[in-house]
Image: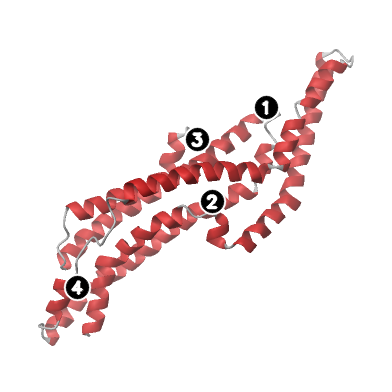
């Protein structure tokens, strides 16, 4: 029973905190690091063989529609100069579609570099163990059997709650990564709409959405840093009551992490 109680205490007061220290590394992972280089290469190949040809079809439709508009504006007479200018407008988008994944890699690297620098800057003051559980752990040996049983009953919901919260944090972090992967793989389609006068807003919104998902990582790092500072400044009493207080802070952390995506999209005007 002593070992169980000690393990639960460490899990309650150290479980979320240990996860917090590794969140920065999880947020700044690339899709290849998160899911494996082979799997990521397979996804990119699928995108290049299935999604990209479909995007080129959309580009051809947009080009045909624009040429038809040119023909109508010229009153049925082909203006070679105007036609040539219209054709030139589709050369750069064609190159962009075929190089979409490379362009997104550049955008991802730029945002990721900023997030890593942000995590390094704000993480320097929040590193280290947030709570010391040694005093409560040492007291366990002096408690009788029924006292230990009562303590176990009090700690059980806290232990379960912390496990659930830890799982939720992992889901939020990896949910963002999955969103990045989905945007990445299907990105040639919105890129194909840039040249169409009516649908060009789709491509512009996609760029802002992709940037917002990347920027969300910076928001998440700030949320984690603020949580660490709050716990450190309001020194947690290592007890059952302190465990409930810590769970309250963890709940606030989860709520802010879950809303970080909406905040980043509002920040860039996409929501």
Question: Answer yes or no: do the residues labelled 3 and 4 have beta carbons within 8 Å?
Answer: no
Question: Answer yes or no: do the residues labelled 1 and 2 have beta carbons within 8 Å?
Answer: no
Foreground disc of the pair 1, 2: 2
Q: Residues within 10 Å of mark 4 (few under 14, many from 20)?
A: some
Q: Residues within 10 Å of mark 1 (few under 14, many from 20)?
A: few
Relative to 242, 158 lies left or right: right
Residue 198 numbered tag: 1
Q: Residues within 10 Å of mark 2 (few under 14, many from 20)?
A: few
Asked whether residue 187 appears in the rendered view, the answer is: no
Instruction: Report how far apart the C-alphas of labels 1 and 2 lie in the structure.
Output: 26 Å
Q: Compare marks 1 and 2 and give the one earlier in the sequence.
A: 2
Q: Compare marks 4 and 1 and give the one earlier in the sequence.
A: 4
Instruction: Report how far apart the C-alphas of labels 4 and 1 lie in the structure.
Output: 62 Å
Q: Considering only vertical position in the picture, is 187 above or below 6?
A: above
- From the image, tell me which residue sits under label 4: 154
Q: Position of residue 149 (x, y in %)?
A: 17, 82
- From the image, tell me which residue sits under label 3: 270
Q: Nearer the viewer, residue 43 or 29?
A: 29
Relative to 45, 208 lies left or right: left
- As helix, strand or loop, the secondary structure at mark 3 comes to loop
- As helix, strand or loop, the secondary structure at mark 1 comes to loop
**Number of labelled discs?**
4
Q: Residue at x 76, y 30 (%)?
A: 90
Q: Position of residue 93 (x, y in %)?
A: 72, 33
Residue 179 numbered tag: 2
Q: Compare marks 3 and 2 and give the one earlier in the sequence.
A: 2
Q: Residues within 10 Å of mark 3 (few under 14, many from 20)?
A: some
Residue 16 numbered tag: none
Relative to 19, 38 lies left or right: right
Instruction: Report how far apart the C-alphas of labels 3 and 4 lie in the structure.
Output: 45 Å
Q: Residue at x 56, y 61 (%)?
A: 35
């Amino acid at each position: 029973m002593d070992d169980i109680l000690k393990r639960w205490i460490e899990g309650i007061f150290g479980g979320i905190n240990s996860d917090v220290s590794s969140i920065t590394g999880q947020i700044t992972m690339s899709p290849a690091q998160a899911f494996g280089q082979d799997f990521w290469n397979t996804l990119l190949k699928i995108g290049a063989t299935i999604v990209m040809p479909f995007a080129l079809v959309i580009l051809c439709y947009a080009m045909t529609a624009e040429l038809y508009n040119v023909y109508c504006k010229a009153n049925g007479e082909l203006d070679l100069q105007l036609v040539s200018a219209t054709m030139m407008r589709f050369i750069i988008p064609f190159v962009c579609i075929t190089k979409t994944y490379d362009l997104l890699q550049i955008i991802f690297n730029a945002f990721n570099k900023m997030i890593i620098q942000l995590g390094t800057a704000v993480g320097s003051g929040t590193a280290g163990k947030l709570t010391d559980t040694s005093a409560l752990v040492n007291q366990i040996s002096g408690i009788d059997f029924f006292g230990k049983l009562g303590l176990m009953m009090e700690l059980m919901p806290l232990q379960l709650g912390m496990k659930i919260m830890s799982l939720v944090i992992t889901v939020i972090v990896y949910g963002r990564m999955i969103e990045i992967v989905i945007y990445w793989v299907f990105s040639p389609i919105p890129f194909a709409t840039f040249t169409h006068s009516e649908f060009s807003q789709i491509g512009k919104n996609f760029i802002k959405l992709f940037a917002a998902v990347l920027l969300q990582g910076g928001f998440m790092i700030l949320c984690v840093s603020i949580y660490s500072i709050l716990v450190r400044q309001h020194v947690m009493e290592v007890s059952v009551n302190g465990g409930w207080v810590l769970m309250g802070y963890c709940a606030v952390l989860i709520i802010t992490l879950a809303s970080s995506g909406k905040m980043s999209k509002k920040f860039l005007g996409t929501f």
